[in-house]
Image: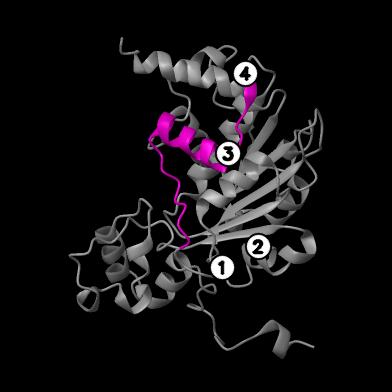
Amino acid sequence: MVDCDPEILKREMLSYHVKHGFVDADELLDFIDTYWKLRVPRAQVCPEHTPPAEYIVDSFFETVQDSVCWANRGGGKTLLGALSTWLDTVFKSGCATKILGGSQEQSKRMYEHLTGEGDGWGMVTQDFRHLLRGEMLAHRTVLNNQSNIQILTASSKSVRGAHPQKIKLDEVDEMDPNIYEAALLVPQTKRGIKASVQIFSTMHRTYGLMDQVISEAARSGYKVYKWCIFDVMEKCPEWRVCDECELWEDCQGKARHADGFYSIEDAISKKRQVSRDTWLCEMLCFQPSQEGLIYKEFDMALHVV
């Protein structure tokens, strides 16, 4: 039996899925693992949270129209936003996506996960170059299948104009509320592809925009995907002693069931470096930090008539 070149097999697999799509979640996630060596965490670690893989699957198969990914710092939300964008662009003909960050720099970060520049992951590998129409530009990428990705600047003018099917809003807690409101009107359903608003952010501002988005998610029709550092953490090895671990206070053994990428040692280091409020808010996705407030006990619902 003659061994087949792995690169030839990968090209054939890509061509097959471009033509036929994916039959289910497992086939899609296995493709991601094969092409980008990216294992999207699938395990249900925290009972009240969502495995990041659920967002990727729901987004690609369009079982959820509008969504919010509320995740920890370093939890891969920008990377997964880029991944879902590239999957839509490659496997859905005529799919247009606009990416808007809380700043121009934040918009670039999601795009760099496509190009591989900076510390980006690099979704557009050599395997996919033949699908491009011309070069990837700093503000726009176009494919032969009529799909495209456009990077927006954080200005009111940039969010007005053409109406693609998808818009990705990254780090909305840093976004101007007026620009955010205008961006919500961008997407429109066309060519059999559903309109979709997808939001990605930590929630680190008390009464900030992300706080408002989450509070109004049910009324606005958003599905909330929430994951914390333990949901994306690497599996904790049996040799580690739980009661001697600095994460035990919050972990309580949950990391034994994890299947993610975040280093345990990095997590311990971060916990040592920041305040308890910051750790709870930005890494465990609890309520926004109360640091800096004059009256930490103030509650809008309770104290305002």
Tell me where residue 293 sits by quadrant. Answer: bottom right
Can you give x and y, in whole percent of width and height, for residue 217 in the image? 72, 63
Can you give x and y, in whole percent of width and height, for residue 211 in the image? 63, 67
Residue 45 visible to the viewer: yes
Colouring scheme, one of rainbow, by chain, secondary structure, one colour = one colour
**Whole-number angstrom distance, CA of label 1 to CA of label 4:** 38 Å
> Which element is circle 1 on?
loop
Q: Which residues are magenta?
A: 19-44
Q: Which residue is mark 1?
A: 205
Q: Which residue is mark 2?
A: 209
2 relative to 31 in the view: left or right: left
Dot 1 and dot 2 residues touching (CB under 8 Å): yes
The earlier-in-sequence mark between 1 and 3 is 3
Q: Which residue is mark 4?
A: 143
The earlier-in-sequence mark between 4 and 3 is 3
> Which element is circle 3 on?
helix
Q: Nearer the viewer, residue 110 or 138?
A: 110
Q: Nearer the viewer, residue 199 or 177?
A: 199
Residue at point 48%, 43% (across, down): 79
Q: Which residue is mark 3?
A: 84
Residue 114 position (above or below residue 253): above
> Which element is circle 4 on?
loop
